[in-house]
Amino acid sequence: MTAVESPTGHDSVHGRPPAGHGRYTLDGDAEVESRIERDQRLIAAAVQAAVPAHVFRALVLMGGYGRGEGGYRRRDGLPEPYNDYDYFVVVAHADRAQRKHLVEALAHQARALESKVGVEVDFALLREERLPRAEYSLMNAEMLWGHQVIAGDPQVLRTMPAMPFGSLPLAEFTRLMLNRGALLLMNQQRLAQGGTLRPAERAILFKYLLKAVLACGDARLAGNRCYDPAYATKRRLLRALDWPGQASFMGLYDLAWEHKFHPDETRFANADAAQWQQRLIALWLETLAWLEQQRLGQPIGDWTAYCAPAPPKGQGGRDWGGLRNLALTVRDLGPLMPLRQPRWSLRYPRERLIGALPLLLAHPGMATTPALAAALALPLDTPWSAAAARLLRLWGRYA
């Protein structure tokens, strides 16, 4: 089975095809591409075995491999993937009970597949009947621009609306910064435990650090209204910009870029993980403050003031009204929250996380302040570790 680039008419930016058109990696040879193709056949067979034929529409590979920008490495001379395999499983006319069953079945398949392909496998359900009303988001825009249909209808996404990158709200990149900042928070949790990092832990920690660097680059491009999804173009555009600290940042970015496509954990075998973490937290905070200044038209000088319902964080989209946000707050934080925190309760819950995360990263180990307690619906003086765990639990729902 050969993966097919979906001819939706959306796979372009300013008329150009995706960077890795027809490929899984940026520069992998035939052996590398064949290895990843083999994984796709294995995964497609597992999905089609788990999803009844009458509801299955397509298996869509997204992310780096879907764009032709996946990373790889060699172990004992043989190629293997480095990045996760991320998929949408498109289904049609499946009722709620069927979808719940499919989510469970696909999660089981994902766990079994990970031991076979060597990287994490992630499946999310996508309902075909909802495609014409798909959210205008960075994730969806990048999927339309560069994806591969591994099995099923090669034109399954054709009903999705066009999603030009130039018109994406800057709040989409605030959301990206939240997602990468949450990885930094996971790093901080591990470092707070003390002890020597095992090689696998060190590899994950530095992977998360470098993901944060790449996200900061995306935020800089978006704030300068020149975002492009292709990594080779991103690097060229970042070099053409000018801001204080750019030269230092580009050194980090080049390292992160190289590690994304040609990972080598030995680069960081002797690095001081805590110092790297502090450096990346500082970069993340600086970049988020700059991005939010571009989005809001006013400086962000105080993370305590930012950790409040106002300024708004731009999350929730056009379909999320105050009543729906109130219902989500009651469901996830308890029925008394609308009385205790009426202003927060009318905001989409992701806004709480965006407000709280800078404080947690800027002050690791601190007791919970009133602003942080309100954002995360926690008692005052909750330990930092419990507040961090609370944020990450909510992030798992609202990433």
Image (cartoon, rainbow, N blue to C red):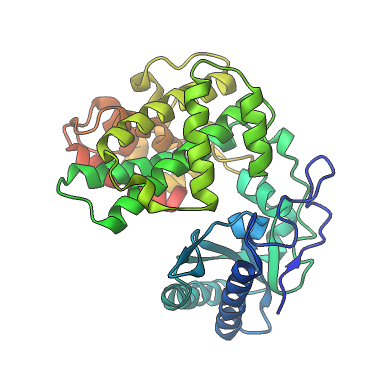
Q: Nearer the viewer, residue 107 or 190?
A: 190
* Image position, residue 178 (x, y; %): 45, 39
Is 27 placed above or below 192 here? below
Horizontal side of residue 395 vs 313, given as left or right: left
Q: Nearer the viewer, residue 153 or 95?
A: 153
Horizontal side of residue 142 vs 192, given as left or right: right
* Image position, residue 169 (x, y; %): 64, 33
Q: Nearer the viewer, residue 164 or 212?
A: 212
Q: How many marks?
A: 0
Horizontal side of residue 44 vs 209, given as left or right: right
Residue 92 appears in the figure: no
The residue furthest front is 77
Is 287 placed above or below 262 here? above
* Image position, residue 324 (x, y; %): 52, 45
Is 216 placed above or below 82 here? above
* Image position, residue 394 (x, y; %): 37, 48
Quarter holding the N terminus? Answer: bottom right
The structure residue drawn at horizontal position 40% and vertical position 41%, both measured from the top left corner, is 209
The structure residue drawn at horizontal position 53% and vertical position 29%, both measured from the top left corner, is 250
Is 211 placed above or below 69 here? above
Q: Nearer the viewer, residue 98 or 146?
A: 146
The structure residue drawn at horizontal position 58% and vertical position 57%, both measured from the top left corner, is 70
Residue 276 appears in the figure: yes
Q: Quadrant of residue 182?
A: top left
